[in-house]
Amino acid sequence: MLKAKHIPIEEDNGNIFQANTELILGLPGSANKIILSFFQEKDLEMDLENISFEYEKFDSVVNTMKGIARYQTFGFVVGILLGEKLRLANNAKWVLEKRYGYNPYFEPHLYSQDDKIKYDPWYWAVRTLMSRVKFNFGEALKEILTISKQASS
């Protein structure tokens, strides 16, 4: 235990941030890698430059599961996709916030260039993946962009 320099206790099996620590530490550079790898694995097409893709095909893949299983499986990539769309729309930047527990981890968020506005794509990923019977990326994106415009005005 002392050699590892951390307490070997799993904090939360549902924590998508602990499970993806290496990718998170690579943000913003790893965002495209995360997105591209998911889309290639699921055999979906994507224009990486504009983060554009067919929402209906993406939704059909995500809707193969429900509730917590859907969140644990797709929550990370949905959060990154919503985050990248927010980043492009609001000229925002990724910032890693350290969270403390038995095993500290980083939670990525977006901030405006002047650091006055915080955007939280993870709230929307959880909300849309767990509370709706059918996930709809287009609707989730529309909601989060509308709220982000209100926050920045």
Image (spheres, rainbow, N blue to C red):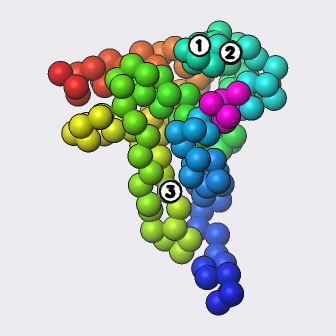
**Which residue is depicted at the point 53% across and 61% down?**
105
| Kind of residue at disc 2 | Met
- Residue 88 is left or right of residue 137, and the answer is left
In the rendered image, which quarter is residue 113 located in?
A: top left
According to the picture, the residue beneath numbered tag 1 turns out to be: 52
Amino acid carrying label 3: it is Phe
Looking at the image, residue 86 lies above or below residue 110: above
* Mark pair 1, 2: CA separation: 6 Å
Amino acid type, label 1: Ser
Secondary structure at numbered mark 1: strand
Q: Are marks 1 and 2 in contact (CB under 8 Å)?
A: yes
Q: Is residue 84 above or below residue 106?
A: above
Left or right of 12, for residue 122: left
Residue at position x 42%, y 25% in the image: 86
- Which residue is the site of mark 2? 46
- Crowding around mark 2 (Cα neighbors within 10 Å: few <14, some 14 to 19, many 20+) is some
Q: How far from the left and from the top, in percent, is residue 22?
A: 64, 53
Label 3, on which residue? 106
